[in-house]
Image (spheres, grey):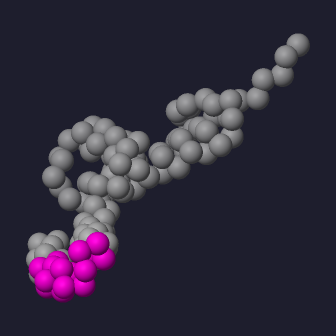
Amino acid sequence: MAVIIKYIVERAGVEKMTFSSKPEADAYDRMLDIADELFVMLGQSELLPDERQREDLALYLAQQKDLVIQTLNQKTKGNKAPLAEKEQAKDKAKDQGASGYEKAAPALTEVADTSDELAA
């Protein structure tokens, strides 16, 4: 006789999913917790009056959590781009001499300032 260990994720007495490992079950349970919170948030917005649509969207967003977080953090990454451009200008200036960098620095500062203004 074989012994099989099952991890069952259950919500409100309803079996949602069965897993063979505890980490997978815990990850799914956390995803469902996120979906529950998103469902409440979407309900407060009144953008989706249909409860089924809110539930589906909340579950989708929870499943795509990493992509959603990455997308929301794009502003932070956008602010790092001017720094990368400044570093490239510094490297180029070393190759061309200091006078080339002195000419490029004000333009890069202006680009960085404009980028910050657009991001705000």
User: Which secondary structure dominates the residues rendered in magenta?
Assistant: helix
As drawn, 49 above or below 75 = above
Q: Position of residue 69 (x, y in %)?
A: 36, 56
As drawn, 97 above or below 58 = below
Residue 74 picture quarter: bottom left
Question: What residue sits 35% from the left and 48% below the top?
Answer: 67
User: The magenta stretch spans which residues?
Assistant: 93-109
From the viewer's perspective, is 18 left or right of 115? right
Q: Where is residue 39 in the image (x, y as percent from the top left)?
A: 33, 51
Residue 86 picture quarter: bottom left
- Residue 111 lies in the magenta-colored region: no
Which sits in the foreground, 31 or 93?
93
From the viewer's perspective, is 109 left or right of 22? left
Q: Where is residue 87 in the image (x, y as percent from the top left)?
A: 31, 73
Question: What residue sits 84% from the left and 22% below the top?
Answer: 3
Residue 40, visible in the rendered structure: no
Question: What residue sits 69% from the left and 35% below the top?
Answer: 21
As drawn, 91 above or below 38 = below
